[in-house]
Image (spheres, rainbow, N blue to C red):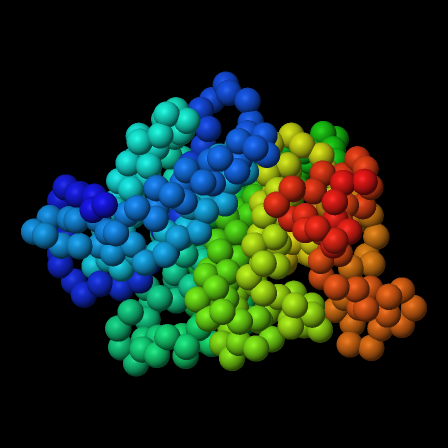
Amino acid sequence: MILRLNSVGIGHDEPMRYVVSAHLKISEGTSVLDPLQQEGAVALLQNGLRSVEGIEGPDGMNVPLDDFVVAVYPGGAILKVFVDAPALEFAEASVHELCLELLGHSELLSEWTIDECEVQLHPLFAQKSLAAAEGPDAPPADVEARRAELARPLLVPRPQGPTAEETEQMRGRIQALAPALTVFGPESFGCDDDDPSAAVEGAELAAGALVYAIDLLVDELFLDLHTLTKNRTTVDDFEGVFRVLDTLPERFAHQYDTSFVRRFLVASIAMTARFTSGGSPMLSCVAEELALRLLLDQARVTLDLYGLLDDRASSALDFFAGGVFEDLDHEWLYEDEPSGLGVALLDTAVDSWFAPFGRERYVHPYTRQEGDGSGSE
Protein backbone atom coordinates (compact mmCIF):
# COMPACT_ATOMS: atom_id res chain seq x y z
CA MET A 1 0.00 0.00 0.00
CA ILE A 2 1.21 3.50 -0.86
CA LEU A 3 -0.28 6.43 1.09
CA ARG A 4 -0.56 9.83 -0.58
CA LEU A 5 0.29 12.99 1.29
CA ASN A 6 -0.62 16.55 0.35
CA SER A 7 2.08 19.18 0.06
CA VAL A 8 3.63 20.26 3.34
CA GLY A 9 5.46 23.24 1.89
CA ILE A 10 9.08 22.12 2.07
CA GLY A 11 11.89 21.74 -0.41
CA HIS A 12 13.17 18.57 -2.05
CA ASP A 13 16.44 17.97 -0.25
CA GLU A 14 18.34 14.71 -0.19
CA PRO A 15 16.55 12.24 2.11
CA MET A 16 17.96 11.25 5.48
CA ARG A 17 16.87 8.83 8.17
CA TYR A 18 14.41 10.03 10.82
CA VAL A 19 12.89 8.15 13.76
CA VAL A 20 9.39 9.50 14.36
CA SER A 21 7.73 8.82 17.72
CA ALA A 22 3.95 8.52 17.59
CA HIS A 23 2.00 8.27 20.85
CA LEU A 24 -1.50 6.88 20.36
CA LYS A 25 -4.02 6.98 23.20
CA ILE A 26 -7.28 5.20 23.84
CA SER A 27 -10.36 7.42 23.90
CA GLU A 28 -11.09 9.29 27.13
CA GLY A 29 -13.57 7.66 29.45
CA THR A 30 -12.89 4.11 28.26
CA SER A 31 -11.39 1.31 30.31
CA VAL A 32 -7.69 0.62 30.00
CA LEU A 33 -6.66 -2.28 27.81
CA ASP A 34 -6.38 -5.69 29.45
CA PRO A 35 -3.50 -8.02 28.38
CA LEU A 36 -5.60 -9.72 25.67
CA GLN A 37 -6.69 -6.37 24.21
CA GLN A 38 -3.09 -5.18 24.25
CA GLU A 39 -2.02 -8.21 22.21
CA GLY A 40 -4.85 -7.51 19.75
CA ALA A 41 -3.80 -3.88 19.38
CA VAL A 42 -0.20 -4.94 18.72
CA ALA A 43 -1.36 -7.28 15.96
CA LEU A 44 -3.57 -4.64 14.32
CA LEU A 45 -0.86 -1.98 14.35
CA GLN A 46 1.92 -4.31 13.18
CA ASN A 47 -0.18 -5.75 10.35
CA GLY A 48 -1.17 -2.27 9.24
CA LEU A 49 2.41 -1.04 9.22
CA ARG A 50 3.64 -4.11 7.35
CA SER A 51 1.16 -3.39 4.55
CA VAL A 52 2.61 0.08 3.92
CA GLU A 53 5.47 0.30 1.42
CA GLY A 54 5.84 4.04 1.54
CA ILE A 55 4.12 7.42 1.56
CA GLU A 56 3.78 9.37 -1.68
CA GLY A 57 4.17 13.11 -1.35
CA PRO A 58 3.83 16.04 -3.77
CA ASP A 59 5.44 15.77 -7.22
CA GLY A 60 5.67 12.01 -6.87
CA MET A 61 8.18 12.17 -4.00
CA ASN A 62 8.26 8.89 -2.08
CA VAL A 63 8.97 8.50 1.63
CA PRO A 64 9.93 4.85 2.21
CA LEU A 65 8.96 3.22 5.48
CA ASP A 66 12.15 1.42 6.45
CA ASP A 67 11.28 -0.17 9.80
CA PHE A 68 9.05 0.20 12.84
CA VAL A 69 8.67 -0.85 16.48
CA VAL A 70 5.32 -1.13 18.29
CA ALA A 71 4.80 -1.12 22.06
CA VAL A 72 1.30 -1.24 23.57
CA TYR A 73 0.49 -0.41 27.19
CA PRO A 74 -2.85 -0.17 29.06
CA GLY A 75 -3.47 3.42 27.98
CA GLY A 76 -2.47 3.23 24.32
CA ALA A 77 0.57 2.57 22.15
CA ILE A 78 3.95 4.01 21.22
CA LEU A 79 5.17 3.64 17.64
CA LYS A 80 8.72 4.22 16.45
CA VAL A 81 8.66 4.59 12.68
CA PHE A 82 11.92 4.77 10.69
CA VAL A 83 11.52 6.74 7.44
CA ASP A 84 13.85 8.28 4.87
CA ALA A 85 12.60 11.81 4.21
CA PRO A 86 14.00 15.06 2.76
CA ALA A 87 13.22 17.05 5.92
CA LEU A 88 12.13 16.56 9.50
CA GLU A 89 8.74 18.21 8.84
CA PHE A 90 8.07 15.82 5.96
CA ALA A 91 8.94 12.81 8.12
CA GLU A 92 6.55 13.93 10.87
CA ALA A 93 3.73 14.76 8.46
CA SER A 94 4.14 11.42 6.69
CA VAL A 95 3.98 9.37 9.87
CA HIS A 96 1.04 11.43 11.16
CA GLU A 97 -0.85 10.61 7.97
CA LEU A 98 0.14 6.97 8.36
CA CYS A 99 -1.23 6.88 11.93
CA LEU A 100 -4.53 8.42 10.80
CA GLU A 101 -4.76 5.71 8.15
CA LEU A 102 -4.06 2.93 10.67
CA LEU A 103 -6.65 4.15 13.15
CA GLY A 104 -9.26 4.84 10.49
CA HIS A 105 -9.07 1.37 8.97
CA SER A 106 -9.75 -0.50 12.23
CA GLU A 107 -13.04 -0.37 14.08
CA LEU A 108 -11.27 -1.34 17.31
CA LEU A 109 -8.85 1.59 16.98
CA SER A 110 -11.19 4.14 15.42
CA GLU A 111 -11.75 6.02 18.70
CA TRP A 112 -8.05 6.27 19.48
CA THR A 113 -6.32 9.64 19.15
CA ILE A 114 -2.85 10.77 18.13
CA ASP A 115 -1.43 12.49 21.17
CA GLU A 116 2.00 13.20 19.69
CA CYS A 117 3.84 12.57 16.43
CA GLU A 118 7.29 14.06 16.20
CA VAL A 119 11.00 13.47 15.85
CA GLN A 120 12.30 13.72 19.41
CA LEU A 121 15.91 14.71 19.91
CA HIS A 122 17.86 14.62 23.14
CA PRO A 123 18.19 18.29 24.20
CA LEU A 124 21.99 18.15 24.24
CA PHE A 125 22.16 16.41 20.86
CA ALA A 126 19.68 18.85 19.32
CA GLN A 127 21.56 21.92 20.54
CA LYS A 128 24.88 20.48 19.39
CA SER A 129 23.52 19.59 15.95
CA LEU A 130 22.08 23.07 15.42
CA ALA A 131 25.27 24.76 16.55
CA ALA A 132 27.49 22.58 14.35
CA ALA A 133 25.35 22.24 11.25
CA GLU A 134 28.06 23.95 9.20
CA GLY A 135 31.68 24.85 9.58
CA PRO A 136 34.67 23.12 11.17
CA ASP A 137 32.66 21.85 14.16
CA ALA A 138 30.15 19.98 12.01
CA PRO A 139 29.54 16.36 13.13
CA PRO A 140 31.47 13.65 11.25
CA ALA A 141 29.85 12.25 8.12
CA ASP A 142 30.52 8.63 9.08
CA VAL A 143 27.53 7.15 10.93
CA GLU A 144 29.56 5.04 13.35
CA ALA A 145 31.81 8.01 14.15
CA ARG A 146 28.74 10.11 14.98
CA ARG A 147 27.39 7.34 17.18
CA ALA A 148 30.68 7.15 19.06
CA GLU A 149 30.67 10.91 19.55
CA LEU A 150 27.08 10.99 20.78
CA ALA A 151 27.76 8.10 23.15
CA ARG A 152 30.21 10.10 25.23
CA PRO A 153 29.05 10.94 28.76
CA LEU A 154 26.57 13.81 28.81
CA LEU A 155 27.93 15.41 31.96
CA VAL A 156 30.80 17.18 30.18
CA PRO A 157 31.83 20.84 30.21
CA ARG A 158 29.71 22.82 27.77
CA PRO A 159 31.43 25.44 25.62
CA GLN A 160 28.42 27.69 26.18
CA GLY A 161 25.74 27.28 28.79
CA PRO A 162 22.06 27.93 28.21
CA THR A 163 20.91 31.53 28.23
CA ALA A 164 18.94 32.85 31.18
CA GLU A 165 15.84 32.81 29.00
CA GLU A 166 16.40 29.17 27.98
CA THR A 167 16.90 28.18 31.61
CA GLU A 168 13.68 29.87 32.73
CA GLN A 169 11.72 28.35 29.85
CA MET A 170 12.99 24.89 30.76
CA ARG A 171 12.27 25.53 34.44
CA GLY A 172 8.65 26.32 33.61
CA ARG A 173 8.34 23.34 31.29
CA ILE A 174 9.70 20.88 33.84
CA GLN A 175 7.66 22.27 36.73
CA ALA A 176 4.51 22.00 34.60
CA LEU A 177 5.22 18.28 34.14
CA ALA A 178 5.49 17.56 37.88
CA PRO A 179 1.75 16.82 38.46
CA ALA A 180 1.92 14.07 35.82
CA LEU A 181 3.85 11.94 38.35
CA THR A 182 0.51 11.20 39.98
CA VAL A 183 1.64 8.39 42.28
CA PHE A 184 4.14 10.55 44.15
CA GLY A 185 3.28 13.76 45.97
CA PRO A 186 5.63 16.42 47.39
CA GLU A 187 6.21 14.26 50.47
CA SER A 188 7.92 11.67 48.25
CA PHE A 189 10.55 14.33 47.52
CA GLY A 190 11.05 15.38 51.12
CA CYS A 191 8.82 18.43 51.43
CA ASP A 192 5.32 19.38 52.58
CA ASP A 193 3.02 22.38 52.52
CA ASP A 194 4.86 24.04 55.42
CA ASP A 195 8.21 24.11 53.61
CA PRO A 196 9.46 27.34 52.03
CA SER A 197 8.78 27.92 48.34
CA ALA A 198 12.38 27.14 47.39
CA ALA A 199 12.06 23.60 48.79
CA VAL A 200 8.74 23.10 47.01
CA GLU A 201 10.32 24.27 43.76
CA GLY A 202 13.14 21.75 44.23
CA ALA A 203 10.57 18.97 44.62
CA GLU A 204 8.69 20.17 41.54
CA LEU A 205 11.88 20.24 39.48
CA ALA A 206 12.78 16.73 40.61
CA ALA A 207 9.34 15.32 39.82
CA GLY A 208 9.06 17.13 36.50
CA ALA A 209 12.54 16.06 35.43
CA LEU A 210 11.59 12.43 36.04
CA VAL A 211 8.52 12.81 33.82
CA TYR A 212 10.61 14.60 31.17
CA ALA A 213 13.17 11.81 31.30
CA ILE A 214 10.57 9.12 30.57
CA ASP A 215 10.31 10.02 26.87
CA LEU A 216 14.09 10.25 26.53
CA LEU A 217 14.65 6.86 28.17
CA VAL A 218 11.96 5.09 26.14
CA ASP A 219 13.07 6.70 22.88
CA GLU A 220 16.69 5.72 23.42
CA LEU A 221 15.72 2.16 24.31
CA PHE A 222 13.75 1.95 21.05
CA LEU A 223 16.79 3.18 19.12
CA ASP A 224 19.07 0.67 20.87
CA LEU A 225 16.60 -2.12 20.10
CA HIS A 226 16.58 -1.10 16.44
CA THR A 227 20.39 -1.15 16.33
CA LEU A 228 20.55 -4.55 18.00
CA THR A 229 17.84 -6.04 15.77
CA LYS A 230 19.41 -4.69 12.60
CA ASN A 231 22.80 -6.19 13.46
CA ARG A 232 21.41 -9.47 14.84
CA THR A 233 23.83 -9.63 17.72
CA THR A 234 24.25 -9.04 21.45
CA VAL A 235 25.57 -5.92 23.12
CA ASP A 236 28.79 -7.72 23.97
CA ASP A 237 29.46 -8.74 20.35
CA PHE A 238 28.55 -5.39 18.77
CA GLU A 239 31.45 -3.06 18.03
CA GLY A 240 29.34 0.10 17.94
CA VAL A 241 27.80 2.04 20.78
CA PHE A 242 24.39 2.19 22.42
CA ARG A 243 22.58 5.03 24.13
CA VAL A 244 21.19 3.06 27.10
CA LEU A 245 22.32 -0.54 26.92
CA ASP A 246 25.96 0.42 27.46
CA THR A 247 24.97 1.80 30.88
CA LEU A 248 23.47 -1.49 32.14
CA PRO A 249 25.74 -3.82 34.15
CA GLU A 250 28.58 -4.63 31.75
CA ARG A 251 29.19 -8.11 33.11
CA PHE A 252 25.92 -9.30 31.57
CA ALA A 253 26.36 -7.71 28.13
CA HIS A 254 26.58 -11.13 26.45
CA GLN A 255 22.97 -11.76 27.56
CA TYR A 256 21.59 -8.47 26.21
CA ASP A 257 19.97 -9.71 23.00
CA THR A 258 16.83 -8.46 21.25
CA SER A 259 14.57 -10.61 23.43
CA PHE A 260 16.04 -9.12 26.60
CA VAL A 261 15.85 -5.55 25.31
CA ARG A 262 12.21 -5.91 24.28
CA ARG A 263 11.34 -7.22 27.74
CA PHE A 264 13.39 -4.51 29.47
CA LEU A 265 11.69 -1.87 27.32
CA VAL A 266 8.23 -3.18 28.20
CA ALA A 267 9.18 -3.33 31.90
CA SER A 268 10.32 0.30 31.72
CA ILE A 269 7.07 1.38 30.03
CA ALA A 270 4.96 -0.58 32.54
CA MET A 271 6.79 1.03 35.46
CA THR A 272 6.51 4.59 34.17
CA ALA A 273 2.87 4.01 33.16
CA ARG A 274 2.05 3.09 36.77
CA PHE A 275 3.88 6.13 38.07
CA THR A 276 1.89 8.48 35.81
CA SER A 277 -1.53 6.81 35.89
CA GLY A 278 -2.14 6.23 39.58
CA GLY A 279 -0.89 2.66 39.80
CA SER A 280 1.32 1.08 42.42
CA PRO A 281 4.44 3.04 43.45
CA MET A 282 6.27 -0.15 44.40
CA LEU A 283 8.95 -1.52 42.09
CA SER A 284 8.09 -5.00 40.85
CA CYS A 285 11.39 -6.59 39.86
CA VAL A 286 15.12 -6.04 39.37
CA ALA A 287 14.56 -4.85 35.79
CA GLU A 288 12.39 -2.02 37.11
CA GLU A 289 15.04 -1.12 39.68
CA LEU A 290 17.59 -0.79 36.89
CA ALA A 291 15.13 1.19 34.74
CA LEU A 292 14.48 3.61 37.62
CA ARG A 293 18.22 4.03 38.11
CA LEU A 294 18.51 5.03 34.43
CA LEU A 295 15.53 7.37 34.78
CA LEU A 296 17.09 9.12 37.77
CA ASP A 297 20.39 9.51 35.92
CA GLN A 298 18.59 11.03 32.93
CA ALA A 299 16.64 13.42 35.17
CA ARG A 300 19.86 14.64 36.75
CA VAL A 301 21.50 15.10 33.34
CA THR A 302 18.53 17.15 32.09
CA LEU A 303 18.50 19.42 35.14
CA ASP A 304 22.28 19.82 35.07
CA LEU A 305 22.23 20.64 31.36
CA TYR A 306 20.00 23.66 32.00
CA GLY A 307 21.64 24.77 35.24
CA LEU A 308 18.70 23.62 37.35
CA LEU A 309 20.40 20.90 39.42
CA ASP A 310 20.84 22.92 42.60
CA ASP A 311 21.18 21.46 46.10
CA ARG A 312 17.41 21.40 46.68
CA ALA A 313 16.59 19.58 43.44
CA SER A 314 19.46 17.14 43.98
CA SER A 315 18.36 16.44 47.56
CA ALA A 316 14.77 15.93 46.37
CA LEU A 317 15.90 13.30 43.87
CA ASP A 318 18.02 11.59 46.55
CA PHE A 319 15.06 11.55 48.95
CA PHE A 320 12.80 10.12 46.25
CA ALA A 321 15.30 7.36 45.40
CA GLY A 322 15.68 6.45 49.06
CA GLY A 323 11.94 5.97 49.37
CA VAL A 324 11.25 4.05 46.16
CA PHE A 325 14.19 1.65 46.28
CA GLU A 326 13.45 -0.84 49.03
CA ASP A 327 17.10 -1.88 49.05
CA LEU A 328 20.21 -1.35 46.95
CA ASP A 329 20.96 -4.99 46.15
CA HIS A 330 20.83 -4.23 42.42
CA GLU A 331 23.93 -2.05 42.86
CA TRP A 332 25.93 -5.25 43.27
CA LEU A 333 25.29 -5.97 39.60
CA TYR A 334 27.68 -3.14 38.73
CA GLU A 335 30.50 -4.37 41.00
CA ASP A 336 33.71 -5.59 39.33
CA GLU A 337 34.74 -7.68 42.34
CA PRO A 338 31.57 -8.53 44.28
CA SER A 339 31.44 -10.37 47.57
CA GLY A 340 28.70 -11.87 49.71
CA LEU A 341 25.26 -11.25 48.24
CA GLY A 342 26.83 -9.69 45.16
CA VAL A 343 28.34 -13.03 44.11
CA ALA A 344 24.92 -14.69 44.17
CA LEU A 345 23.39 -11.89 42.11
CA LEU A 346 26.14 -12.01 39.50
CA ASP A 347 25.70 -15.75 39.06
CA THR A 348 22.06 -15.20 38.08
CA ALA A 349 20.85 -15.02 34.48
CA VAL A 350 19.18 -11.78 33.39
CA ASP A 351 15.89 -13.67 32.94
CA SER A 352 15.51 -13.58 36.72
CA TRP A 353 15.50 -9.77 36.64
CA PHE A 354 11.87 -9.95 35.52
CA ALA A 355 10.71 -12.20 38.38
CA PRO A 356 8.21 -10.34 40.62
CA PHE A 357 9.30 -9.54 44.17
CA GLY A 358 6.00 -10.85 45.53
CA ARG A 359 2.39 -11.73 44.79
CA GLU A 360 1.28 -8.11 45.11
CA ARG A 361 3.79 -6.84 42.56
CA TYR A 362 2.66 -6.40 38.94
CA VAL A 363 5.01 -7.61 36.21
CA HIS A 364 3.85 -7.07 32.64
CA PRO A 365 2.88 -10.41 30.98
CA TYR A 366 5.17 -9.73 28.00
CA THR A 367 8.25 -9.87 30.21
CA ARG A 368 7.50 -13.39 31.41
CA GLN A 369 9.17 -16.37 29.76
CA GLU A 370 8.55 -20.00 30.52
CA GLY A 371 11.13 -21.37 32.90
CA ASP A 372 12.68 -18.03 33.84
CA GLY A 373 11.04 -17.85 37.24
CA SER A 374 9.15 -14.68 36.40
CA GLY A 375 5.70 -16.13 36.20
CA SER A 376 2.97 -15.27 38.65
CA GLU A 377 3.33 -16.89 42.01
Residue drawn 36% across and 56% down?
67
Q: In which quarter of the image is the N terminus?
A: top left
Q: Quadrant of the C terminus?
A: top right
- From the viewer's perspective, tell me whether residue 109 is left or right of residue 101: right
Q: Percent x, y for residue 71?
A: 50, 45
Instruction: Give the residue furthest to the front.
Output: 370
Q: Percent x, y for residue 306?
A: 51, 56
Q: In this view, does 90 lie above or below 148?
A: above
Give 212 or 108, whichever is nearer the viewer: 108
Q: In this view, does 36 lie above or below 88?
A: above
Q: Percent x, y for residue 143?
A: 37, 75
Give 307 or 12, whichever is nearer the viewer: 12
Give 7 or 252, whichever is nearer the viewer: 252
Q: Percent x, y for residue 308?
A: 57, 53
Instruction: Give the residue furthest to the left.
Output: 59
Residue 304 in view here: no
Residue drawn 32% across and 58% down?
66
- From the viewer's perspective, tell me whether residue 30 is left or right of residue 330: left
- From the viewer's perspective, tell me whether residue 49 is left or right of residue 351: left
Residue 51 in view here: yes
Residue drawn 25% across and 56% down?
64
Residue drawn 60% across and 75% down?
236
